[in-house]
Image (cartoon, rainbow, N blue to C red):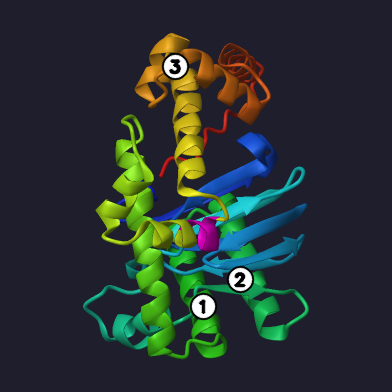
C-alpha cells in the first residue's frame, strides 16, 4: 500500500502529469491505495494490470481504478498519462446521504475498474470531463471548486452507466484473495531487509505455501521470491539516488548479504552497475531531466 499522501486532509485530491518513459523500465510497479484513480492516455499506448485483468489502451482512452485495487502500468515506449487520485470522501462526506446512496454502492461493488473508450457515447462524455479536470489544474483560478464540481459530474456518469451489480460471492472471494496477497506484499515491504523465506510469508498470512505461490502467480505473475528480490532492488535504487551511501552498505541494508551477488543482480535488472546507475541519475538531474524513482509502496 502506498505510504505517500495524495493531496491533503482538507483537499484529498492530487493531479500528476506522468510520462512513463521517465520511470525505470517505463513502468509504475504494483501498488494500491485507498484513493480512487483516473488515468487518461494523452499519447502512446499503456498496458494495465488491474487485479486479475490485463489490457492495453491507446491514445484518447482512459480508465477508472476503484479503491484498494492492485494495479500496475507499463508502456513499451514514451507514454504521457495525466492522472488524478482522490479519496471517496472528496466527492461527498462519509456521513451524508450522498455518500451512502451514490458512492458506497460503487466502491463496494464488483467493479474493480472501468475502461473509457472514445467511441462509446457515455464513456466519451466521461473522457471529456476527465480532460476538463486535467485542463483546470493549470490555469483555473478556482481550480479546487471547479475540480470538485467536475468530479461529481464524472462520478454521476459512472454511477448511472457502469455495471455496479453487487455480486456477493464474487466480491467475497476476490476481496479475500486480494487481501491475503496485499498482506503478504506488505510483510515483504516491511521486512525486506531481513532474510525472508516462503515459509515466513505463508506463516504471516496464515495460509499454505501453495496458496502463497498461487496468489502471486495469479495476480502478479511472478513468484513471491522474485517479488522480494525485485522489491529489494527497487529500494536499493532509491537509496543510490537519494543518499551518498556506499554500494556495499546499500547492499546489506536492502537484504543482500553478499555485495558481489547484489551487484550482479542489479546489473541484470537495470542493465547498469549500481555505480553507473547512480551516475546516470545524477547526470539526468543536472541536465534538468526528472528523476523517476521506483514506486514506493
Callouts 1 and 2 close, C-beta under 8 Å: yes
The numbered disc on residue 257 is none
Q: Is residue 221 magenta?
A: no
In the depicted structure, whether residue 51 falls above or below residue 249: below
In the depicted structure, whether residue 155 falls above or below residue 189: below
Q: Main structural element of the magenta stretch: helix, strand or loop?
A: helix
Residue 245 screen position, x and y as percent: 41, 11
Quadrant of the drawing holding the C terminus? top left
Residue at x 26% of width, y 60% of height:
206
Which label's residue is closer to the chain start, 1 or 3?
Answer: 1
| Residue indicated by mark 2 | 129
Q: Foreground mark, 2 or 3?
A: 3
Q: Secondary structure at mark 2?
A: helix
Check disc 1: other Cα within 10 Å, few if <14, some if 14-19, many if 20+. Answer: some
Check disc 3: other Cα within 10 Å, few if <14, some if 14-19, many if 20+. Answer: few
Q: Secondary structure at mark 1?
A: helix
Which label's residue is closer to the chain start, 1 or 2?
Answer: 2
Instruction: Pick whichever, 269 or 150, lies toward us.
Output: 269
Extent of the magenta region:
216-220
The numbered disc on residue 153 is 1
Residue 62 screen position, x and y as percent: 65, 66
Residue at x 57% of width, y 88% of height:
161
Residue 131: quarter of image:
bottom right
Residue 126 screen position, x and y as percent: 62, 75
Position of 170 with respect to 16 (left or right) is left
In the depicted structure, whether residue 256 falls above or below residue 20: above
| Residue indicated by mark 3 | 258
Amino acid at each position: 500500500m502506498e505510504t505517500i499522501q495524495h493531496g491533503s486532509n482538507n483537499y484529498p485530491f492530487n493531479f500528476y502529469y506522468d510520462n512513463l518513459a521517465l520511470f525505470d523500465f517505463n513502468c509504475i510497479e504494483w501498488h494500491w491505495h485507498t484513493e480512487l484513480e483516473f488515468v487518461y492516455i494523452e499519447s502512446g499506448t499503456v498496458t494495465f494490470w488491474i487485479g486479475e485483468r490485463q489490457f492495453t489502451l491507446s491514445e484518447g482512452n482512459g480508465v477508472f481504478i476503484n479503491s484498494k485495487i492492485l494495479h500496475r502500468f507499463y508502456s513499451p515506449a514514451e507514454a504521457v498519462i495525466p492522472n488524478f487520485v482522490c479519496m471517496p470522501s472528496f466527492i461527498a462526506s462519509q456521513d451524508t446521504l450522498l455518500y451512502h446512496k451514490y458512492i458506497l454502492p460503487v466502491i463496494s461493488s464488483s467493479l474493480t475498474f472501468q475502461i473509457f473508450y472514445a467511441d462509446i457515447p457515455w464513456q466519451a462524455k466521461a473522457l471529456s470531463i476527465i480532460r476538463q479536470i486535467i485542463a483546470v489544474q493549470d490555469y483555473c483560478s478556482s481550480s479546487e471548486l471547479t475540480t470538485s464540481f467536475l468530479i461529481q459530474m464524472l462520478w454521476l456518469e459512472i454511477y448511472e452507466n457502469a455495471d455496479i451489480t453487487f455480486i456477493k460471492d464474487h466480491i467475497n472471494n476476490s476481496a479475500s484473495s486480494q487481501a491475503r496477497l496485499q498482506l503478504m506484499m506488505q510483510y515483504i515491504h516491511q521486512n525486506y531487509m531481513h532474510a525472508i523465506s516462503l515459509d515466513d510469508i505463508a506463516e504471516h498470512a496464515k495460509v499454505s505455501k501453495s496458496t502463497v505461490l498461487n496468489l502471486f502467480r495469479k495476480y502478479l505473475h511472478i513468484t513471491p521470491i522474485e517479488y522480494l528480490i525485485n522489491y529489494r532492488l527497487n529500494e536499493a535504487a532509491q537509496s543510490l539516488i537519494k543518499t551518498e551511501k556506499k554500494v556495499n552498505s546499500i547492499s546489506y541494508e536492502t537484504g543482500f548479504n553478499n555485495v558481489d551477488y547484489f551487484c550482479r543482480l542489479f546489473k541484470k535488472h537495470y542493465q547498469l552497475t549500481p555505480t553507473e546507475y547512480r551516475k546516470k541519475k545524477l547526470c539526468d538531474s543536472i541536465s534538468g531531466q526528472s528523476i523517476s524513482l521506483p514506486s514506493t509502496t
